[in-house]
Structure formats: structure tokens, C-alpha cells
Image (cartoon, rainbow, N blue to C red):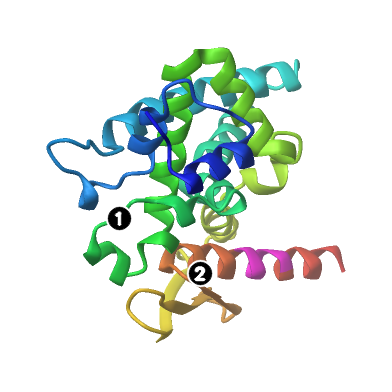
Amino acid sequence: MKIAAELTEFSKTIGYTFRDPELLLRAVTHASMSSPTRGDNQRLEFLGDRVLGLTMAEALYDADKKAAEGTLAPRFNALVRKETCADVARQIDLGKVLKLGRSEMISGGRRKEALLADAMEAVIAAVYLDAGFEAARDLVLRLWGDRVRTVDADARDPKTALQEWAQARKQTPPKYLELKREGPDHAPVFTIQVRLETGESEQAKAPSKRNAEQAAAKALLQRLEMQNDG
């Protein structure tokens, strides 16, 4: 099968040439573009999630011989979560080659975090089916790069950490308030405020409510920790 020029370039970007290009085409085809003759990437996404998980579990296990399970688990979650997969997808410009139906095109599907993350996992699965686990593992480790080494900076979920901080001081859980939503429907930007019962608060903006909440919680945590250090 002859592969489209854009997918040939994408293969160069990820450093892998497919023996069966149909696998890559399916990996970048969203359900909104599927047809009886062309499948979509949903089944591949399911498989790729598992390949990614095993790769990261092995990498973390080998990287820190003394880490306990309780230390490895949050690191693992940080490396395989949808936000990280979407970040890697943006890094290789995966959105540019996605095959989307008209409705997804209009709604900004090429920038949607969940859609990018699913496609990233599908590409991993495509490589796995094309050449086996070692090739897929090599791809993941190459694209994730230093994230395995620096994962501790992202491993602690800020919302959870802030809630634990409040509970340790016998405060009620932090409250999150949506202050503003800007931009078009296909590319919104949310402004979220987090507030403790003692009045401390921070705000953050992000393309999704969840990311904005996490960013606000992280900012407040950093400020509280600086106050304690002072």
C-alpha cells in the first residue's frame, strides 16, 4: 500500500518506518472518519494503552532499584495519563495528520487533548503490531525522552496534594470556582480559582477545566510551601 506523503513525513518524525502502512493510517483515523472499508483507531488505542503501561512500568522499575511500590505508582500514573500522552502527541505534531470527520474538524479536533492522547496510544499499538514489543518500547522511550528521569516533578497530583494539606490542618476540602470561559467552543480557555476555607486562593488558566484546576492548586501549594519555608 502506498502511504500519503504527510504520513511518510510523520514516520520520519517518529523515527519508524512501517512495513504495513495501513496500520499507521488506521492509527490516525478517528471514529468520525471511519467507514466500512477504513477502520478507526479505537481498538488500537485500547492495545496501545497496555503497551505504554508495560513499557513505563518496566522503565521505572529499572530506573530506581530501591523505589517502593508506593513511590513507583504516582510516577507511573504521571507518565501514562492522558495529559502526558497528549503532550507527546503535540511534540510530534500528531494532530496535523489525524483523519477526522467534518464535525470534529469544525470543533477543533486536532487540538483536543483526549483525541490526541488516544491517537498517540494508537500509534504505539500500530508499531507494536508492525514489529513487536521491542520496537514499540523503543518508540515510547524515545518520544517520552527525559520524562522518565524527571517524573518526580509531575508525579504528585496538585489537587490531591492540596486536599491532603488542608485535611492535615483540619480544614474543609479546597473549593474550585470557574471564574471565566473565553474563546470559541472548539478552543475554550477556562479561568479557575481555588480557595481554602482560611481565605488563601490562586487562579489559573488552561484549555480544560481539569488542567486549570490542577494549575491553580499547584500555584497555591507552591505559595503555601514558600510561606512555610519562610
Cβ atoms at labels 2 and 1 below 8 Å apart? no
In percent of width and height, residue 103 lies at: 22, 66
Q: Which range is magenta?
A: 218-222
Q: Judge whether 95 appears above or below 206 on screen.
A: above
Give the crowd class for mark 1: few <14, some 14-19, many >=20 residues within 10 Å: many
- Percent x, y for residue 202? 60, 78
Front position in the image: 42 or 114? 42
Q: What residue type is labelled 1?
A: Leu
| Mark 2 element type | helix
Q: Looking at the image, which residue is at 58% across and 18% down?
A: 135
Q: Nearer the viewer, residue 65 or 228?
A: 65
Left-right relation of 132 to 40: right
Residue 5 picture location, percent across and down: 49, 46
> Looking at the rendering, which quadrant does residue 13 occupy?
top right
Name the kind of residue labelled 2 in the image: Ala
Q: Residue at x 26, y 39 (%)?
A: 40
- Graded by Cα atoms within 10 Å as few (under 14), some (14 to 19) or many (20 or more), the crowding at tag 2 reads many
What is the quadrant of the N terminus in the image?
top left
In the rendered image, residue 105, in percent from the top left (x then y), is placed at 31, 65
The numbered mark at residue 100 is 1
**Nearest to the observer: residue 200 or residue 191:** 191
Position above or below: 182 against 137: below
Residue farthest toward the right in the current orientation of the protein: 230
Please give the name of the residue rendered at 24% of the width and 58% of the height, measured from the top-left corner. Answer: 101
Side of 10 where 29 appears, left or right: left
Please tell me whether residue 195 belongs to the stretch shown in magenta.
no
Q: Name the residue under label 2.
A: 212
Residue nearest the observer in this picture, 193 or 100: 100
Q: Mark 2 or 1 closer to N-term?
A: 1
